[in-house]
Amino acid sequence: MSVTKDVKKFYAGNRKHYPAKTALSIAKQQAYEWHNWDALEQSGLVKLEILPDDCCCYEDLAGDCFDIELNADSVPGGARTIIAQKKAFKAKIEQDGVWGYEISVKCPCCGGWKFVDSCWGFVGEVDEEAILYGKCEAIKIALA
C-alpha cells in the first residue's frame, strides 16, 4: 500500500477525533507522520516501550468514580452497582496489571536515547490512540 493510501486510511479511521475543517491539515500531517513510525522504528531511530506501572496506587486509578456518596444518584442501580463496578475494577487491575509507555528517539550526536513522551496508568492494555501524540513528537524529532 502506498504512503498516500495509508495516510488516507489512517485519517478516515480517526476523523472523529478532529474538529471539522479547522484541524484537517493537522490530522493529515499526523496521519503522514504515523505512517513513518514503522520505518523509523525498524531503522533504530525511535522506540516505544510498554512497561509495568509500579508507581500507581488504586486511589489514583479510581479517583472518585466509586464514591457512593458522590455518585449513587447518577448511576442506575445506585450503591449496589457502584460496589459491583469497584469490585470488577479491582479484579481487572489484579488480573491485567497497570501499564505505561515511554517513547524515545536516538540522539544523532551521542547515540543514546532521548526521552520524548510517556503516559502511565493504563489498566489492562495501553491504548494505541493515547500513544499517537508521543509517536508524532518522536517522528518530528527523528526527521529533523
Image (cartoon, rainbow, N blue to C red):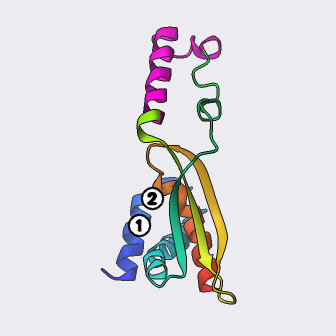
Residue 26 at least partly seen = no
**Which residue sits at x=61%, y=62%?**
22
Percent x, y for residue 80?
Answer: 47, 9
Q: Which residues are magenta?
A: 68-93
Percent x, y for residue 104?
Answer: 60, 71
Quote the CA–CA distance across marks 2 and 1.
6 Å
Mark 2 is on which residue type? Asn
Q: Based on the displayed image, in which of its 4 quarters is residue 10 positioned?
A: bottom left
Q: Secondary structure at mark 1?
A: helix
Q: Nearer the viewer, residue 29 or 51?
A: 51
Horizontal arrangement in the rendering, residue 42 relative to residue 117 (left or right):
left
Residue furthest toward the right? 109
**Which residue sits at x=57%, y=12%?**
72
Residue 3 at least partly seen = yes
Above or below residue 8? Residue 83 is above
> Where's the C terminus, which quadrant?
bottom right
Q: Based on the displayed image, in which of its 4 quarters is residue 117 positioned?
A: bottom right
Task: Look at mark 2 in the image and give the residue it sits on.
Answer: 14
Q: Nearer the viewer, residue 48 or 143?
A: 48
Q: Secondary structure at mark 2?
A: helix
**Which residue sits at x=50%, y=10%?**
78
Mark 1 is on which residue type? Phe
Residue 123: assigned label: none
> Where's the N terminus, which quadrant?
bottom left
Percent x, y for residue 129?
Answer: 49, 56
| Prevailing secondary structure of the magenta residues | helix
Task: Look at mark 1 in the image and give the residue it sits on.
Answer: 10
